[in-house]
Every structure is written in C-alpha cells, then in structure tokens.
Image (tube, rainbow, N blue to C red):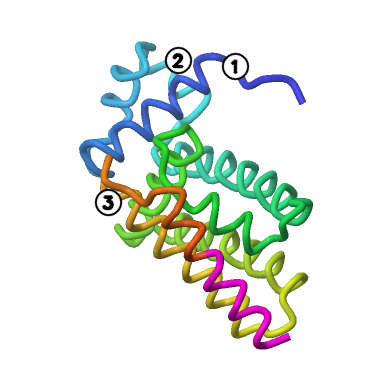
C-alpha cells in the first residue's frame, strides 16, 4: 500500500495532538489546519468535516490494531505475554492514536466507542485462541487495560520491566490453573 499523502498524515497527527492536549472541542477544522501547517482548503480536501477526521483516525487505529493482533498471535511466548508486555505507554504514534481514540470515546463519540469495542474484541479473540478458559482470557485483557491506563496516566513513573514480569508470572499461573 502506498504511503498516505503528507497533508493527510500531517492533518491526522495534528488532530491527535489537539485531542490529547486540548480536548475534542478544541480540535476544530481551523485549529487542525493551523496545527498541521496547511491551509484549511488543504485539510478539507482530505477531511471535509470533523467527522471525516474522526473516521480517518479510526481507520489508522484499526490498521495498527490489526497489525498488533498479528504480532500477538505469532509471539513466541504467546498472546498473553505479548499483550501484557505491550500494554504500556511509550508516547509512540500508536499510543497517541489509541489514547486520542479513548478520549473521543469518553466524549461519547459513537464511532470511537465502536472502534475501541472492535479492537478490544480482536485482542480478546487472540487471547481466547491460546487460553482455554474465556474468563482467564478476559482477565488477561483487563490486566492489560489496567497496565495501559496506569502507564498512560503515570507519566515517567510507570511500571518497570520487573513489575511487568511479575504480572506475567501471575497471569501464567492463572492460565495454568485453568487449563
């Protein structure tokens, strides 16, 4: 697939930045165009409305999540270990897109809510493929949710690799006890 046009990518990055730093209401078309360093007409060529910006971001987030699920299924230590190890916030473009989607969802954006539901279901499906007990698979998913929330809100005081290893050991004992 060819890379997206530069103005489109700059617009989505600016939209994410505004949603994260100032909230959804501040992410007007004028503000996004200014933050992206493009004309409003250039923005509207790719995204004629704020809803189109949300749709564009949801497309990016779903593509990133689909790639994450592929890696999760192929991980040599298993889906649960992969999920817990990657449920940390590192301020990457993926992290920023996911957190922006969460913020939109919290603001009652139905498209963002549905996107997050589909993403979480795809992670749960991958866990269920490798964990016999559906309740344990959901517990692992929720552990990852908690890790991600804690990491996203803790800033530089997040979990250490040893903390994650300890949680993985707990999850493995839970998986082993129910298989």
Specify whether 64 is left or right of 158.
right
Reply above or below: 171 against 176: above
Is residue 16 shown above or below 1? below
Mark whose residue sits in front, 3 or 2: 3
* Residue underneath mark 3: 153
User: Mark 1 Cα within 10 Å, few/some/many (few <14, many 20+)?
Assistant: few
Q: Residue at x 53, y 65 (%)?
A: 117
User: Mark 1 — residue?
Assistant: 5
Range of residues picked out in magenta: 168-179
**C-alpha gap between disc 2 and disc 1:** 11 Å
User: In terms of depth relative to the viewer, which is nearer, 96 or 51?
Assistant: 96
By secondary structure, the bulk of the magenta-drawn segment is best described as helix
Give the mark nearest the N terminus, 2 or 1.
1
Q: Describe residue 42's horizontal placement relative to residue 84 as left or right.
A: left
Tags 2 and 1 touching, CB below 8 Å: no
Whether residue 112 appears in magenta in the rendering, the answer is no
Q: Which residue is mark 2?
A: 42
- Residue 28 at x, y percent in the picture: 28, 33
Secondary structure found at label 1: loop
Measuring from the top left, give residue 113's x and y in whole percent. Answer: 45, 62
């Amino acid at each position: 697939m060819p890379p997206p046009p530069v103005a489109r990518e700059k617009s989505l990055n600016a939209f994410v930045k505004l949603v994260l730093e100032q909230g959804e209401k501040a992410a007007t078309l004028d503000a996004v165009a200014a933050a992206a360093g493009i004309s409003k007409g250039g923005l509207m060529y790719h995204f004629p409305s704020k809803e189109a910006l949300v749709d564009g971001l949801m497309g990016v987030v779903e593509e990133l999540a689909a790639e994450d699920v592929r890696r999760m299924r192929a991980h040599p230590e298993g889906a649960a270990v992969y999920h817990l190890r990657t449920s940390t916030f590192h301020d990457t473009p993926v992290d920023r897109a996911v957190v922006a989607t969460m913020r939109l969802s919290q603001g009652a954006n139905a498209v963002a809510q549905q996107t997050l539901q589909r993403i979480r279901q795809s992670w749960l499906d991958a866990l269920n493929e490798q964990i016999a007990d559906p309740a344990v698979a959901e517990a692992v998913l929720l552990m990852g949710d908690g890790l991600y929330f804690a990491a996203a809100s803790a800033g530089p005081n997040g979990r250490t690799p040893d903390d994650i290893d300890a949680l993985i050991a707990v999850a493995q004992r839970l998986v082993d006890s129910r298989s």
